Image: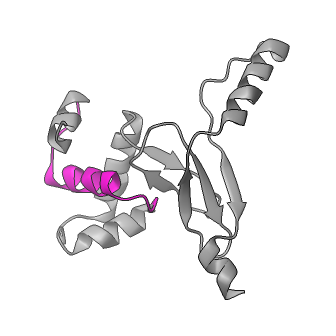
Amino acid sequence: MLSSAEILKKNSLKVTPQRIAIFDYLRSTDTHPTADMIYSALYVTHPYMSLATVYKTLDALKNVGLIDELNVGEGSFRYDGNVEPHHHIICNDCHKVYDLPPINSISAVEDELKSKAGFQVINTKLYLYGICHECSQIK
């Protein structure tokens, strides 16, 4: 498996300790953090890194397809180091974002759109909203 530095180089990105730290963090978590969450998580080991650096790095990683940017409707973006096709479910109470595996019925919708409307679906992002198990236990 390629190291983060090798992946950044392969994608024509400058390799810096900050970029490696941010990319490694996103590849190691499934929490779908915001830029502020990433900054806070890495501050202990990278106190010299600014929030602006986090935003610029996230933008660079997103632009070359190494991470996904999620708009789950809470006023700021979330970031996902897993760029394999998958969908998300969001808890309305605690706002945690969870991964869902690919859903076969989405492929059926895409096939129907192509056959009936001539529409070629390039990418799908499905967000399902509800209440997670932990929050439902509180109510």
Residue at image location 22% in from the left, 37% down from the top: 8
Q: Nearer the viewer, residue 30 or 71?
A: 30
Q: Quadrant of the N terminus?
A: top left
- Residue for point 63% across, 35% down: 124
Q: Residue at x 41, y 45 (%)?
A: 82
Q: Nearer the viewer, residue 110 or 12?
A: 110
**The magenta stretch spans residue 107:** no
- Relative to 54, say whether 137 is above or below: below
- In the rendered image, residue 118, in percent from the top left (x then y), is placed at 78, 12
Q: Is residue 3 left or right of residue 63?
A: left
Against 11, residue 53 (above or below) is below
Q: Quadrant of the C terminus?
A: bottom right
Q: Indicate the quadrant where residue 30 lies.
A: bottom left
Q: Which residues are magenta?
A: 12-32
Point out residue 29 in the picture as x, y percentages from the top left corner.
36, 59
- Which x, y percent locates residue 7? 22, 35
Residue at (41% x, 41% y) in the render: 62
Name the colour scheme.
one colour
Quadrant of residue 28 in the image? bottom left
**In this picture, residue 107 sits left or right of residue 39:** right
Farthest residue, direction right: 116
Examine the image and state in which quarter residue 106 appears.
top right
Q: Position of residue 117 (x, y in %)?
A: 83, 16
